[in-house]
Image (cartoon, rainbow, N blue to C red):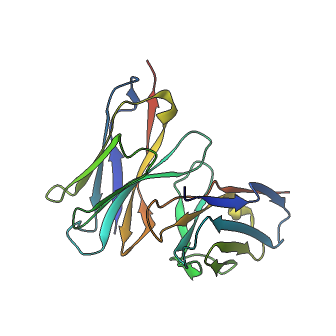
């Protein structure tokens, strides 16, 4: 059974760096084709894909945010870490991590973690 | 810039109605198109991938079709539990963009 869970601060101040951790079970990020992505959803708005890391440490980033985002993995801990620098109130959203296997369709999702950016 | 668009942005239909949602990609994505359903207050759920292949436990009243730049999601007979926002997503190549969503209401 595949599960993912996001963790991190619920409140960050403008200009700070957001660090979120996705802890997963039921799959290994060492298996060919497997990856974990990050998607966010501002309140009342649409889903926005942000980043993806693959089993072979290849990474993809959204062009709109690639200068601010870093994604890494720790396969020994079954975790993926997402960093976003220079946070702004417009980054207020629920942040989801999600699993892919073979192709970049997100078949299993975490419950999401809400992040508010405010001073 | 690569874009995904959806129409309509929202719709209201009666129970039992046939409902069709359209998704368009700004460039050819072959059949690398997924549909997600997000019910109010819930996590998005994968419904269909490869434009027309059901993910697990998806009711047969949902159908996906299309290829290239034009895709549709059809609900053959709208049910109360189908009230949700539906998103399409490109996974042909990065960026793996989602569409803006279509909100489905019951009239």
A93 to the left or right of A4: right
Residue B52 appears anywhere in the view: yes
B83, above or below A104, in the image: above
Query: Which quarter of the figure is the N terminus of chain A placed in?
Result: bottom left
Q: Is residue B78 visible?
A: no
Q: Residue furthest front?
A: B1
Left or right: residue B7 compared with residue B92: right
Residue B76 in the image, given as x and y percentages of width and height: 76, 77
Name which residue lies at 28% across and 67% down. Answer: A26
Instruction: Please give left or right for residue B80 compared with residue A81 in the image.
Output: right
> Quick one: B29 or B40, which is closer to the camera?
B29
**Residue A113 coordinates in the image, percent (x, y):** 42, 42
Q: x, y percentage for residue B10?
A: 76, 54
Q: Residue at x 43, y 52 (%)?
A: A62
* Residue B76 higher or lower than A15, as above or below: below
Compared to residue B14, the image places residue A16 above or below, namely: above
Residue A20: quadrant of the picture: top left
Please state which of residues A49 and B26 is positioned toward the viewer in this rendering: B26
Identify which residue is drawn at 48% across, 42% down. A94
Question: Within the image, what quadrant is residue B71 found in?
Answer: bottom right
């Amino acid at each position: 059974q595949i599960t993912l869970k996001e963790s991190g601060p619920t409140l960050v101040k403008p200009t700070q760096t957001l660090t979120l951790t996705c802890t997963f079970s039921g799959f290994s990020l060492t298996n060919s084709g497997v990856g974990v992505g990050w998607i966010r959803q501002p309140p009342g708005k649409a889903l926005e894909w942000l980043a993806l890391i693959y089993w072979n440490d290849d990474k993809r980033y959204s062009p709109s945010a690639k200068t601010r985002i870093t994604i890494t993995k720790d396969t020994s801990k079954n975790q993926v870490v997402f960093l976003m620098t220079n946070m702004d109130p417009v980054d207020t959203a629920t942040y989801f991590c999600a699993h892919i296997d073979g192709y970049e369709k997100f078949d299993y999702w975490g419950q999401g973690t809400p992040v508010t950016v405010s001073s | 810039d690569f874009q995904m668009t959806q129409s309509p942005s929202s719709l209201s239909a009666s129970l039992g109605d046939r409902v069709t949602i359209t998704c368009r990609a700004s460039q050819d994505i072959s059949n690398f198109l997924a549909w997600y359903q997000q019910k109010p207050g819930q996590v998005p759920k994968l419904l269909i991938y490869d434009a027309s292949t059901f993910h697990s436990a998806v009711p047969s009243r949902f159908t996906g079709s299309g290829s290239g730049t034009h895709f549709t999601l059809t609900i053959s007979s709208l049910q109360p539990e189908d009230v949700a926002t539906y998103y399409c997503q490109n996974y042909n190549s990065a960026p793996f963009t989602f569409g803006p969503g279509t909100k489905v209401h019951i009239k």
